[in-house]
Every structure is written in C-alpha cells, then in structure tokens.
Image (tube, grey):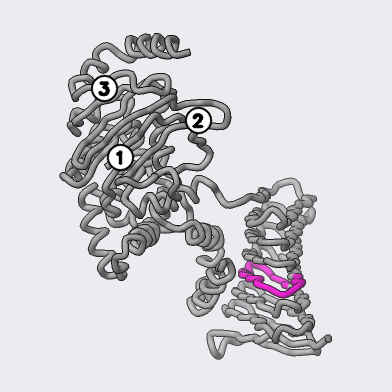
C-alpha cells in the first residue's frame, strides 16, 4: 500500500538566487542574504487507493532574506500524509507561510520555525478542512531565540461530518529574546454534531519584556446570519455555503499569489456542496 | 394582500401575541406602534419566518397562500421583506455579492432571468443613489463596521433592490439622527406604489412625520388595542402609552 510521492516544488520569480538540494524525501533550500523569493509546495491526489506521503523541507533564510511559502495539500481520501517544515531565520529575515490542508484520511502538518537572529519575523497562516472520517492535525512550534522578533500565527479549521481537527501550537520565547512580539489565534467552525475540534495554543515565556497574546475559538454557523441571508431569498444550502466560504475567506485573501488563490476558491466552494 | 387572523405566537411557553387580526391591502401603509414588550417585533419576525417562535393559534394568508407554512427564503421569493431592527454583520461577504446573490435568488424563485454582473451593477448603483449610499460601502463586508444609521440605510437599500410587494420595517427609525431618518423616509416614499404595501413598526411617532400612514394600530400586551388614522399617532405622541396600556390591562383582565 505504501508509496512515497514528493511534492511539486517551484521557486519563483524565475532566476531567484535560491540554492536547493534534494536528499531522499528531504529538500533543503537556502535564501541568500537580502534576497527575496516565493516557494510553492503542492500535493495532488494520487488516486483513491491507500498510499502514504512523507516529505521534509528545510529552509534557511540568511540575514535580511524574505521568503513566502505556499503549501497546498490535496490527497486522495485514503491517503496518509505527513509533512515537516523546518525554518531557520537569521537576523531581520522574514518568513511567511500559507498552508491549505484539504484532504487525505490522515493529514499531519508540522512546522518548526526558529527565529535565530535579531529582529527575525514569521507569519504562519493556515486553513484546514476535513469531512467524512478524516483527521487533520497541525503542529507548530515557533522559537524566539533572539531579541526584537515578531511572530504572527493564524490558523482556521472547518470540520464537517465525523472529521477531527487538531491544532497544537507552541510558542517558546527564550530568555534572550527580549522585546518579542507574538500573537497566536486558532478558530474552528464545526458543521456537524459529530465533528470534533481540539485546540491547544500554548505560550512558554522565559524572557521578561515581551508582548504575547493567544486565543482560540470553536463555534458553529451563526443562526442570525443564516436567517438574514434566507430572509433575503437565499436558499438555506446556498446561505450555509456562503457563510462557510466567508469563514475561510480571510485565509484565502491573505494569499497574494493570484493563481493559487483562484485554485483554492473553487475547492472550498465544492467541498460543502450537498446534494 | 395580507390577512392575519387571531394570531397567537410566542417563544417556548411564553405567549407574546395574544390574538392579532389585521388586513393589509396593496398600496397601504400600516403603522404598528406600542410600548416596549408589546409584541411589535415578534409580529414582524413571525411574518418573516424567524426560527424560535411558535404559532399556537390563528393564521396568516398572503395573497391567498398560507404564509406561515413557507420557508423564510420562499417568503422573500413571493415578495415579503423584513427590514431588521438589528441588521446582521457578515464578515467575509461583500455587500455587493450579498445583494447580487439575493436578487438572483429571488429572480430565480419568480421565474425571471438572473441578472449578469453588468446589469446588476447598473441596478445597484441606481438603487444606492436612492438611499444616498456611497459606492465604496458596496464593496465592504455586509454591515461590518457600519454605523447604526448606515446599517438601517443598508436595509432600505436591500428593500429597494429586492422590490418586495410587502415590506415590514421593524423599528427602522430607532437610533437614527434626523438626516438618516429623512433618507430612510425618502427611500420608503419613493418605493411607495399602488401595488406595494408597508407595515411600519415603530416606537415613536417621529418617522410618521415623513411617512404618512393610512392606518395606525396600537399594540399592547400582544393585542391591537386601538386602530385609527394617522391622527392616532399624534395623540400617542402627546399622551404617551400609559393610557393605552391601562386600556389593554382592562381588556386582558376581562378575557382572563
């Protein structure tokens, strides 16, 4: 049953001075000092049979480098997917990530960011959607090692039928990382009584001069909003889909890459089409 | 057009409407006035089909059909519109997209051709002028961050866009400054036509200075305790609701 498929990786703009090397399932990529690039990591379904995917990506951002990372995971409905991302950001480097998890029987997305230089920053964004009996997990660890770092984390989840979602997010601010500014948010939308969401946002602060905030919510579609739409003639199912899309839309709108945004929008719309 | 017969309704075990009867013909404007807690908003919401209310007795016929058996979206389809007392914010859905979806849902229900993007844009811009709404508000999320007055104007805009045959305005005048009140009144007066009827639910007489009702009904304790012409609104303004409530208690007492 097991086969391993590597992601489709593409770096742009073309000719970006990025060094990439592959070793087994693992890919290493280095963005030189002061350079800027984007990286797309895409997993497409490999059919309905059971298969598994394991991939590891290691990114190094040298001083002042900027990298935007887009990851789209769409696996077959019996697939097991595990992917790891490790980021090492040096002084004033800036890392931005947008993760979209749309399927597979079991999907596990792990991100570990080390802000290892003064003033390094990261922004982790993600949307996970699961239905049927799917399980989707996100584990993130952001380590602030040096002063003046900034981290922003915002993950949203939509869980339907008997799906299970887990968001496990840890932020560690080491003793040396004074003046750290960090926020972490996780919001979940449950569409059925059997769907489950677990959210564990966690802060471990060892420095004494920091600004950190975290929070999470688990809720359902808003009955008032549904009635408002229906009272304007919008059929119940259409109203429901529109509100689900609205919940997801701020994660989608954060994607600057138009071609990817246009690819994600119809996926989200189609996911909640009910006959 | 609308015939309400002996309507009893409430939330759970609590009865709020205790036998309302009202007939509304095309072209008419009926004002429903009354103190807080008299059942005005319950009546508006039961007519629009809000969940959570139970009708225990009576019936409501709209153009001969059983209105209470219809879904909220079907009521919009046959031309019933409720302007909300507290318009709902929908982050992530633009006003434009919301209204286009609404217009085309209603047109589909009525067997009309759906409007394409260009025709819709022309239509919404024309309607937005009516409520003096800046085009930039159409690209913002529905009611999100709107002021109280902007929300109410947005309700009137939706009414103007959807062209209902029966419009129910639930305290659309509350919380408006005089400029916003006049814009709302202008919207209603422009929409007034021999085919269209309005039920204007209000606590104050103020709006009725600008929108002349054909009938005024006073609701107290879940019943219409007095009906009259527009002069009744002035009388209420002068005397307050106290004397009406006294009369209502007498009525309730007699029937208990």
How many numbered tags mark residues here? 3
Instruction: Answer with mark 2 or mark 1, whichever residue precedes in sequence.
Output: 1
Please give the chain letter of the residue carrying mark 1: B
> Which of pointers 1 and 3 lies earlier in the amino acid sequence?
1
Q: Are marks 1 and 3 in contact (CB under 8 Å)?
A: no
- Label 2 environment density (alpha carbons within 10 Å; few <14, some 14–19, many ≥20): many
Q: Position of residue B216 (x, y in %)?
A: 25, 26
Quick one: label 1, few (<14), some, or many (20+) residues within 10 Å?
some
| Horizontal and vertical percent position of residue A65 | 61, 75
In the rendered structure, which disc, 2 or 3, sits on the residue that comes first in sequence? 2
Q: Are marks 1 and 3 on the same chain?
A: yes
Q: Residues within 10 Å of mark 3 (few under 14, many from 20)?
A: some
Read off the residue under disc 2: B10
Q: Choose top left, top right, bottom left or bottom right for residue B120.
A: bottom left
Q: Which residue is mark 1?
A: B2
Does the image show residue A144? no
Which marked residue is nearer to the observer: mark 2 or mark 1?
A: 1
Image location of residue A203, percent across then percent down: 76, 51
In the image, which residues are magenta? Answer: A87-108
Left or right of B151 on screen, residue A162: right
Q: Left or right? Give the position of A218 relative to B207.
A: right
Q: Name the disc covering residue B20, or none.
A: none
Q: Is label 2 in a helix, a strand or a loop?
A: strand
Q: Quadrant of residue B37?
A: top left
Classify the position of the C terminus of chain A by image quarter: bottom right
Q: Residue at x 36, y 43 (%)?
A: B82
**Which residue does the numbered mark 3 point to in the structure image?**
B227
**In magenta stretch: residue B42:** no
């Amino acid at each position: 049953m097991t086969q391993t498929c590597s992601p489709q990786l593409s770096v742009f703009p073309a000719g970006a001075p990025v060094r990439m090397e592959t070793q087994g399932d693992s890919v290493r990529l280095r963005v030189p000092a002061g350079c800027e690039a984007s990286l797309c990591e895409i997993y497409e379904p490999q059919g309905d049979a059971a298969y598994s995917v394991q991939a590891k990506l290691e990114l190094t951002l040298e001083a002042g480098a900027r990298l935007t990372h887009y990851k789209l995971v769409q696996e077959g409905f019996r697939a097991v997917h595990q992917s790891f991302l490790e980021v090492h950001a040096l002084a004033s480097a800036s890392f931005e990530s947008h993760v979209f998890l749309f399927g597979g029987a079991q999907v596990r997305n792990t991100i570990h960011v080390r802000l290892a230089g003064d003033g390094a920053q990261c922004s982790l964004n993600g949307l996970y959607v699961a239905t049927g009996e799917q399980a989707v997990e996100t584990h993130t660890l952001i380590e602030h090692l040096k002063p003046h770092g900034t981290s922003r984390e915002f993950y949203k989840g939509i869980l339907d039928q008997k799906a299970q979602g887990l968001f496990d997010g840890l932020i560690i601010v080491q003793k040396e990382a004074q003046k750290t500014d960090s926020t972490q948010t996780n919001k979940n939308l449950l569409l059925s009584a059997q769907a489950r969401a677990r959210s564990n946002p966690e802060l471990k602060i060892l420095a004494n001069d920091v600004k950190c905030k975290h929070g999470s919510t688990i809720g359902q579609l808003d009955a008032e909003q549904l009635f408002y739409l229906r009272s304007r003639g919008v059929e119940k199912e259409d109203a429901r889909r529109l509100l689900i899309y609205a919940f997801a839309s701020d994660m989608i709108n954060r994607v600057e890459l138009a071609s990817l945004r246009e690819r994600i929008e119809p996926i989200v719309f189609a996911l909640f089409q009910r006959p | 057009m609308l015939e309400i017969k002996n309507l009893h309704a409430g939330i759970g075990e609590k009865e709020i409407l205790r036998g309302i009867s009202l007939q509304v013909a095309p072209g008419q404007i009926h004002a429903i006035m009354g103190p807080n807690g008299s059942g005005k908003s319950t009546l508006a919401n039961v007519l629009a089909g809000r969940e959570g209310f139970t009708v225990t007795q009576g019936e409501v016929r709209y153009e001969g059909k059983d209105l209470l058996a219809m879904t909220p979206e079907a009521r919009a389809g046959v031309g019933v519109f409720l302007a909300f007392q507290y318009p709902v914010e929908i982050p992530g859905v633009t006003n434009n997209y919301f209204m286009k979806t609404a217009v085309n849902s209603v047109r589909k229900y009525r067997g009309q051709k759906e409007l394409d993007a260009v025709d819709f844009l022309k239509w919404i811009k024309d309607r937005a002028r009516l409520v003096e709404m800046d085009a930039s508000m159409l690209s913002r999320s529905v009611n999100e961050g709107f002021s109280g007055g902007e929300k109410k104007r947005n309700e009137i805009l939706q009414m103007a866009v959807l062209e209902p045959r029966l419009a129910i305005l639930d305290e659309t005048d509350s919380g408006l400054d005089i400029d916003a009140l006049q814009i709302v009144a202008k919207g209603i007066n422009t929409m007034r036509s021999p085919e269209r009827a309005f039920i204007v639910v209000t606590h104050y007489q103020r709006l009725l200075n600008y929108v002349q009702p054909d009938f005024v009904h006073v609701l107290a304790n879940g019943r219409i305790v007095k009906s009259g012409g527009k002069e009744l609104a002035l009388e209420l303004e002068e005397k307050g609701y106290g004397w009406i409530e006294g009369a209502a208690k007498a009525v309730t007492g007699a029937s208990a």
